[in-house]
Image (tube, helix red, strand yellow):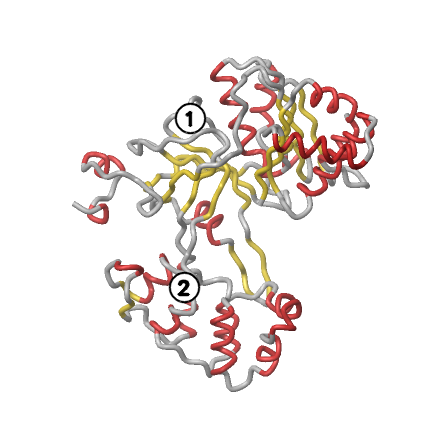
Amino acid sequence: MSASHLSTPNELASAGISYSRKNPFPGHVLVNRRLNSPDSEKETRHLEISLEHSCLDYQVGDSMAVYPTNDPDLVDDILKALCANGDEPIAGLKGAPDTTFRTALLRDYGVTQPTPKLLRSIAQRASAAPLLKELLHEDRRHDLDTYLWGMEVIDFLVEHPSVHFAPQDFIALLPKLQPRLYSIASSLKAHPTAAHFIVDVISYSSHGRKRKGVCSTFLAERCTDSPAPIFPAVSKFRLPEDGDAPLIMVGPGTGVAPFRAFLQERQAIGARGKTWLFFGAQREKSDFYYQEDFESFIADGVLTKLDTAFSRDQAHKIYVQNRMMGSSGELWKWLEEGAYFYVCGDAKRMAKDVDATLREIVQEQGGKSVDEANEYVEKLKSDKRYKRDVY
């Protein structure tokens, strides 16, 4: 019996169905609650997805691949712009059974970010697209990126109503819909029947349209009565085998996810190594994610030290790297005692600033030259004592 004829994890397990990247587990969302208050500038949610009957295994530090479907309202808008009813037949992906145009747009293809192939095809077919044709020249790449900011596939279809695509031809211009990776915010030892996640729900307006993050709104809004397909993704973001080794963890915003899992794991196994967490967000009152959890870890002795940086609670912005520098002497002492240094979160700014601050601390507190400080940090990396999970 194929998995497509079975509806629940229990039925799948009974039929001996195993799960893989190509056949993800149909998880059920057990908990979906907002972590920040309504007056926050962000919407961040804590989700718990059931692992009952899945036999899925992972370690703390791993991520979970979530296989979303697209927003049905957006798909309807695309079908309308293409003058299609959605029932048109479409060839299945890589030997899969044939499907309908609507189903393919919902489940198989990315329908938000326009591909160069799609843009070139629109430019060739549109009766009035001189600007787009110009921007597609190789030497206008930066200008094209600027032009595309905040625009999606639907914008080009609406802007160029003279363009007509046959459904199969249109599908050929779209990328395959990819799973999204989320750091798992829980330990199997503490929560054997569910995986926890912390998700920033992406929602904003541009060019007169409401935009929604594909996977974040899938999890937050569209998984009430339908499964959330998931499968673990192995990472090298691992705890040290030695439970006595000290940990320094830098995880602002949703980057705190794996460190919540680390602390649960260390609590479960009775590890004795001291731990230090740097957490940052916009405002303490509205955005202190998992505050009760961390206070409990401190009370139990699992979390030794917690430094917070709430950037907008004062006139001048304070970030996690500022807190690091403010405790530079103690941080250097921990490193010299063999501490492992972990960073999770934004790659563009935060991770670069944290790395620069770490090197500055090593230079100043260790009495080293710039080159010597860089060698020290690179040695931390080669010894697997400096690990990053950034995105």
Q: Which residue occupies the foreground of this view, 86 or 40?
A: 86
Whether residue 28 sits left or right of residue 163 in the image: it is left
Q: Name the residue under label 1.
A: 188
Q: In this view, does 104 lie above or below 301?
A: below
Residue 308 percent location from the top left of the image: 69, 30
Q: Which disc, if any, is residue 232?
A: none
Callouts 2 and 1 close, C-beta under 8 Å:
no
Residue 66 percent location from the top left of the image: 42, 45
Q: What residue type is labelled 2?
A: Val
Whether residue 1 sits left or right of residue 319 in the image: it is left
Cα separation between marks 2 and 1: 37 Å
- Per the image, label 1 sits on a secondary structure element best described as loop
Q: What residue type is labelled 1?
A: Leu
Report crowding for label 1: few under 14, some 14 to 19, many 20 or more residues within 10 A (C-alpha): many
Looking at the image, is mark 2 or mark 1 earlier in the sequence?
A: 2
Residue 145 percent location from the top left of the image: 62, 66
Q: Residue at x 61, y 45 (%)?
A: 42
Which quadrant would residue 86 be assigned to in this image? bottom left
Residue 49 percent location from the top left of the image: 40, 36
Q: Which disc, if any, is residue 75?
A: 2
Q: Which residue occupies the foreground of this view, 236 or 111?
A: 236
- Per the image, label 2 sits on a secondary structure element best described as helix
Q: Which residue occupies the foreground of this view, 380 or 292?
A: 380
Q: Is residue 312 above or below residue 165?
A: above
Q: Which residue is drawn at 34% across and 46% down?
A: 226
Which quadrant would residue 24 be assigned to in this image? top left
Whether residue 178 sits left or right of residue 207 in the image: it is left
Q: Which residue occupies the foreground of this view, 59 or 49?
A: 59
Report crowding for label 2: few under 14, some 14 to 19, many 20 or more residues within 10 A (C-alpha): many
Check the image and name the residue furthest to the left.
1
Q: Residue at x 42, y 26 (%)?
A: 188
